[in-house]
Every structure is written in C-alpha cells, then in structure tokens.
Amino acid sequence: MEEGGPKALLVEDDDRIRRVLAVGLADEGIEVREAASAEEALPLLDDDVDVALIDLMLPGLDGMALCRSLRERGDLPIIIVTARSDTDDVIAGLEAGADDYVTKPVVPGELAARVRALLRRRRPTEQPRRELAVADLVLRPEEGVVTRGGEPVALTRTEFRLLTELVEGEGRVVSREDLLQRVWGYDYFGDTRLLDVHVRRLRRKIEQDPDAPSVVLTVRGHGYRVQP
C-alpha cells in the first residue's frame, strides 16, 4: 500500500450510491476510483489498486463473475456489496473469491473500517523470519508464503492468515469467534458464514481430500484446529 492512503476500486452501477460512497470513503482517507460496470472496472486494474469494492448486482458481467475474474488474476483483496443478506447471496459471493462482505445500505465509515482491517493484514512485518509446519506444508508467516514439497501453494492473503492462526494453535481448538477477530479484525455478531466459506476454500487448496480433511479439522460447537 502506498503512502497517502489506500486506493479502492469501487464498482457500483447506481450513480447516486457510488458518489455517496466515493465521497464518504474519501473523507475516511481512502482514494477511490469509480466504475459503473465490470467492463469499465477491468481496465482500471492496471493501476495500483489496493482493494476492490464490488456490487454483486451489476449490468452485463455481474459481480460474481467479476470476483472470479479478479481472483484468477491474483490475491487482490475483495469486499462484495450486496443488497440482500440471505445466505445464498453471501455464500456465493464468498465462494467466488471475496474476502469480506457488507450489506446495503452501506455506511461509508463501516466500509472504510472493513477496508482498513483487510489491508492491515497485507503490511510486511519486521519480525525475524520463521517457519511453521503442519502435515506436508511449510509456512513462512512474515513472507506470506506456504509451500508443499518446496512448491508454492496459491492462497489468498486471507486464506494464508487463517491457516497461520490455526497452525500457530499447535493442535488446540481455535474458536470461531477468535478466528473472526484475529483474521478479519471485526465483530461479526455471530455471523460465521464468512469463516465457514473460507475454511472450505482453504481445504480445497491444502487437503488431499477436501471432503475428508486431515489437516484443518472441525470441532463441532467450538471451532477449528489443525492436526499436528
């Protein structure tokens, strides 16, 4: 993230909502580039953008498709904006690759807080280099790198942070609430859909059989742990 505040790409087809959010985010110190459609947004990604804020209900290429396209390109943090908070919409957006979500009507201050929490996890640290290991995976937390047999495993920054928190637990159960607070840095008032979808996405990338996980285990009624 460059000095002068983060840069956000805001993709929203409603002109009034887009302008209100852009002004509100600017007041919070976030520089906003605006797009009214996915097609208009894609060329703007050539610039140095720190986070994408995507309305799911877009004309033409919809928000889900845009999320998938961005995720295929790399690990740019994505926050989806949805007019509906029902499970299907939220889960579909997260499965498409989003890191977080907010529901309309959106309060600019809340959205800015989500952006800052998400981007804090991207900052490099000055801690000494260290390695963590679980199963056949090796993690280097300060570099954001995970390897299997010397080959990199492509995780998003959020997935990497989630795996790191679990591995640092050394086999102890980490509660859902603690994971939400540590990874997302925000109080989700008992809404664990965000966590559950990211665990599924993580398992698809690190488990030999995601349907019968042997690394990231569910402890029903409590949370998750790794098998040391």
Image (spheres, rainbow, N blue to C red):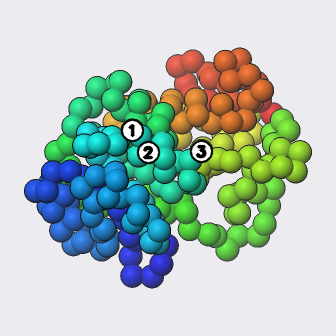
Q: Nearer the viewer, mark 2 or mark 3?
A: 2
Residue drawn 88% across and 51% down?
150
Q: Which residue lies furthest to the left in this view?
A: 16
Residue ID for mark 3: 159
Residue 113 in view of the camera: no
Badge 3 amino acid: Glu
Q: Is residue 99 above or below residue 47?
A: above
Residue 166, position in %: x, y?
Answer: 66, 40
Q: Nearer the viewer, residue 207 or 17?
A: 17
Residue ID for mark 1: 64
Name the secondary structure under disc 1: helix
Name the secondary structure under disc 3: helix
Q: Nearer the viewer, residue 61 or 97?
A: 61
Residue ID for mark 2: 67
C-beta proximity under 8 Å, tags 2 and 1: yes
Give me the C-alpha separation between circle 2 and circle 1: 5 Å
Residue 87, position in %: x, y?
Answer: 34, 25
